[in-house]
Amino acid sequence: KLHVINQSAGGLNLSLKTLLQGAYDSATGNMRDDLRVNGYIPLQEPYSSFGYTFINGGQETTTTDALSITGSNAIVDWIIVEIRDSSSPTTVLYSRAALLQRDGDVVDIDGISSLQFNNLMADQVVVALRHRNHFGVRTLEGISAQGIRTIDFTNLSLATFGSAPMISIDGRNMMFAADANEDGQVNIIDRSDYWRIENGTPYSYFNHKADFNMDGIVNPVDKNTIWRINNGQKVEQLD
């Protein structure tokens, strides 16, 4: 597959992989890109609008060309990448939005390149990922803040923070879906305050957090195949 390594001198060049349970399709082994196909993914990162405060990053903007890529490299959604001090893992040194491909690669705004982080004020860092209706996850062990590094969150052997922060499907770890209010729990609030209100209404990327399977529709499928399965799941908060 095409995956471009940024050539910026120094700093941390990071190749990341993760899967979102909600968008995952066991038949293909990839995630669905229904949001992209239907033109719902915004060109500018959405998380600032959702109230997330970026550190040294944010306001990333992609292009229609990047969202026109098809196949396994097609974009599924925006995702947040946080670089944290490994000696103080709640301290975010740098955060930015990036794009997530169907095969799980987390890439830059051009839709194909790895991520570059410069001038990180730490020798060792841990990496966290957040998504607008999935549990966040972060690495447990630190990596050097310099050089080319690869982190595959789908790998069952990767040590991550918390007792059970990810769900295993088809032999790979994935970020838990159905956390509409991003509080690290899937419970009645996600159903009653989000799914029940949004169910059957015209879809809006910014107003519909209960599209748990990420097909651009909030309907009983989200409740019955995603929320009902994950109801009661809880993870340790990243902060």
Image (cartoon, helix red, strand yellow):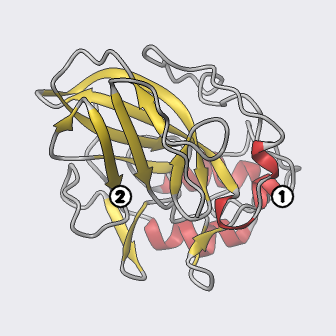
Where residue 36 sits in the image (x, y, percent)?
Answer: 78, 53
Is residue 135 depicted above or below 169 in this figure?
A: above
**Residue closer to the observer: 209 or 38:** 38
Where residue 216 sits in the image (x, y, percent)?
Answer: 78, 57
**Residue closer to the observer: 211 or 220:** 211
In the picture as drawn, the residue positioned furthest to the left comes out as: 87
**Residue closer to the observer: 87 or 221:** 87
Residue occupying the point 39% across, 41% down = 14
Tell me the SS state at disc 1.
helix
The number of numbered discs placed on residues in the rendered structure image is: 2
Where residue 192 sits in the image (x, y, percent)?
Answer: 60, 52
Say the numbered circle drawn on residue 152.
2
Residue occupying the point 44% across, 36% down = 81
In the picture as drawn, the residue positioned furthest to the bottom comes out as: 27
Q: Quadrant of residue 117?
A: top left
Would you say 156 lies left or right of 47 here?
A: left
Residue 238: in sight, yes or no?
no
Where residue 13 sits in the image (x, y, percent)?
Answer: 38, 36
Would you say 136 lies left or right of 126 here?
A: right
Is residue 159 depicted above or below 46 in this figure?
A: below
Of the two numbered discs 2 and 1 on the same chain, state the one appearing first in sequence: 1
Mark 2, residues whose alpha carbon is within 10 Å: few (<14), some, or many (≥20)? some
Q: Quadrant of residue 38?
A: bottom right
Work out how far the residue at label 2 is from the one at label 1, CA to CA, in angstroms. 26 Å
> Which is closer to the viewer, label 2 or label 1?
2
Would you say 226 lies left or right of 91 here?
A: right
Say the numbered circle drawn on residue 76.
none
Say the numbered circle drawn on residue 37.
1
Residue 98: in sight, yes or no?
yes
